[in-house]
Amino acid sequence: MTPAAPVAGRCEPRFAPVREAFAANFAEHGEVGAAVTVLLHGRPLVELVGGWRDAARTEQWTPDTLVDVYSVGKAVVGLLLLQAVDAGAVGLDDPVASVWPEFAAGGKAPATVRHALSHQAGVPAIRQPLVDADLWDWEAMTTALAATEAWWEPGTRHAYHTNTFGHLVGELVRRSTGAPPGERLRQVAGPLGADMWFGVPVTEHHRCAEVIWALGGTPPAVDHQALRGDELMVALGYFNPPGYSSIGVVNTPSWRSAQVPSTNGHATATAVARLYAALLEPGRLLTPALLAEATRPQSVGFCPVLGEEVTFGLGFKPTTARRPFGPNPGAFGHFGTGGAVGFADPATGLAFGYVMNHVIPRWQSTRNRTLIDAVYRCL
């Protein structure tokens, strides 16, 4: 018999429906382990943890439990590059090759920093066959990415750079700031008290939750000969190297220690919420003008990777009717595979973080939707 999931933490009385929704996710929606944090003008209203950080349900989730937050990290590595833009180290409309000359190969010379941040740079997949050992080698990944022939003329269309986004934007961070994305993240997150990492130190691995993939743990082989065009691009984007999407490697020390910023950022729910709360403080992390630019639609249209109409900002995703961050226009954030999400709502001053370890491969889920809806009912 599966033990009842423990739920602990603080929740202000008027936010009791959030606690009820959180508990219901375990009882009714298959949640294994999770945490949710809600800040209003920086003040914590909800900081809940629940369930188990292992599949065997023997280790309880605690406030310092780290877990892979998947694409929630895209907005974070995007923020690091936007800070370099704010500092004048690189411009949004500068060519990527202005700071990364090797990237101009393969028809990518027209790609700009703006294109990189909005999934228009033309490299959602690496063409050169790679192995999982390459994932642990930042230079191997970025060299292969720079050498890849563009899948389209940069700036003429978009496709979600599911995994390559982290190496593309992360290398721009390294080239423009002198610090790799993991080091630069600690410089930003540390002063915020945000427990968030690209590359978890070995000394902190004991805090990492086991990720449980609902669809199993073996990546499919990509048939390079049978696939063409967008089909090949999508398959390679997910599975070249085979573990690029984390399947089969997610709970290994190598994955946790590596820097794969699009996919393997690890954080607590409170860390995610604190980062978004800081973004709502004018000028603290970004200048208001650049934040406004980053969170408005930059590219709108059909995405062959996600299989639907999608709106991209610069690193952040603006709220849309299809993928809303609450009911208010102007909210911005990013979802992650399995339903993890971080967002900020300037209209209310609300910052939200939700993380979990039972991964159902889609962004939106009954779990995150019920939590977000419950929060807004309490405001």
Image: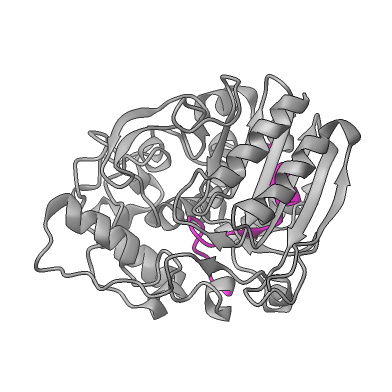
Q: Is residue 100 left or right of residue 358?
A: left
**Residue 75 in view, yes or no:** no
Q: Residue 375 or 114: which is nearer the viewer?
A: 375
Image vertical order of residue 141 relative to residue 85, above or below? below
| Count of numbered labels shown in the rendering | 0
Residue under the image location 25 percent in, 60 percent down: 235
Residue under the image location 67 percent in, 39 percent down: 371
Say which quadrant the C terminus sits in: top right
Give the image location of residue 194, x and y in percent.
Answer: 75, 52
Image vertical order of residue 96 relative to residue 49, above or below? above
* The residue stretch that appears in magenta: 257-276
Residue under the image location 56 percent in, 27 percent down: 290
Rendered image quadrant of residue 26: bottom right
**Residue 212 in view, yes or no:** yes
Residue under the image location 33 percent in, 78 percent down: 131
Q: Is residue 219 magenta?
A: no
Give the image location of residue 64, x and y in percent.
Answer: 79, 62
Give the image location of residue 159, x and y in percent.
Answer: 30, 43
Image vertical order of residue 287 relative to residue 145, above or below? above
Q: Is residue 50 left or right of residue 366?
A: right
Q: Is residue 267 left or right of residue 178?
A: right
Give the image location of residue 319, x and y in percent.
Answer: 52, 28
Say which quadrant the N terminus sits in: bottom right
